[in-house]
């Protein structure tokens, strides 16, 4: 009997060793998978954070752009309101004083040009200037041997630009 017990004990020991070995292998596999799973989870979390940060950045940038546009528009309108006030006063004047009206219109024009200058707007396009297709729109052409080639002879409508950006090209008549 002792032989049978000892064989059973040996079999049980072998089974326990096998179970222990299998458990150890599973723990080792879990330990190997855990760092990878952990790294994957960290990467996913980091990606989600970056995505959320970018979405917030886009929203903030759009809001700042809209606020900047509104501020610039308000500034431009504020500069022109004085001119509107002067025109309203001139229209409400019941007197038929041509010279006074002409002087008022000239003052209003000067005020408007000063307002545009404050906003960075400059007028260009004078007779005698060299024609530049980037800044001028030639609507007529005349042959005149007394003038140089590509010279502006008449300006029908002045051009305006802000810094170097053309707001409206000058409408001109060129020679040769």
Image: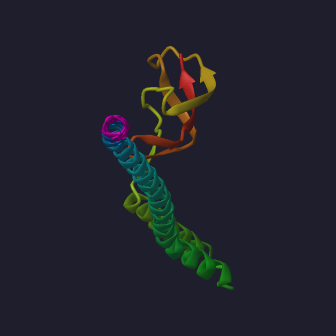
Can you say whether 130 is above or below 2 in the image? above
Nearer the observer, 15 or 146: 15
Membership of 9 in magenta stretch? yes
Can you say whether 94 is above or below 118 in the image? below
Q: Residue furthest front?
A: 1
Membership of 35 in magenta stretch? no
Can you say whether 22 is above or below 101 in the image? above
Quadrant occupied by the N terminus: top left
Q: Residue at x 45, y 51 (%)?
A: 48
Q: Position of residue 3 (x, y in %)?
A: 32, 34
Q: Residue at x 51, y 26 (%)?
A: 133
Q: How is the image coloured?
A: rainbow
**Looking at the image, how many numbered discs can be counted on the residues?**
0
Q: Position of residue 155 (x, y in %)?
A: 55, 38
Q: Position of residue 76 (x, y in %)?
A: 48, 65
Q: Position of residue 52 (x, y in %)?
A: 46, 55
Please tell me in which quadrant of the rendered image residue 165 appears. top left
Nearer the observer, 173 or 163: 163
Question: Left or right: where does residue 101 sit relative to residue 58?
Answer: right
Examine the residues drawn in magenta and state their main secondary structure: helix
Question: Left or right: where does residue 56 sit relative to residue 92?
Answer: left
Please tell me in which quadrant of the rendered image residue 37 appears. top left
What residue range appears in magenta?
1-19
């Amino acid at each position: 009997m002792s032989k049978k017990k000892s064989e059973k004990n040996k079999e049980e020991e072998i089974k326990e060793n096998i179970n222990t070995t299998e458990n150890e292998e599973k723990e080792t596999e879990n330990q190997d998978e855990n760092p990878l799973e952990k790294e994957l989870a960290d990467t996913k979390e980091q990606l989600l954070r970056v995505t959320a940060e970018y979405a917030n950045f886009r929203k903030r940038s759009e809001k700042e752009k809209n606020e900047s546009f509104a501020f610039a528009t308000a500034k431009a309108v504020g500069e022109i309101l004085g001119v509107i006030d002067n025109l309203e006063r001139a229209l409400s004047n019941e007197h038929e004083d041509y010279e006074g009206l002409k002087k008022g219109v000239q003052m209003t024009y000067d005020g408007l040009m000063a307002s545009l200058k404050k906003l960075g707007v400059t007028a260009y396009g004078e007779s005698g200037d060299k024609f530049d297709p980037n800044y001028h729109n030639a609507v007529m052409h005349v042959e005149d041997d007394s003038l140089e080639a590509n010279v502006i002879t008449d300006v029908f409508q002045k051009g305006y630009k802000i810094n170097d950006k053309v707001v409206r090209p000058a409408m001109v008549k060129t020679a040769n």
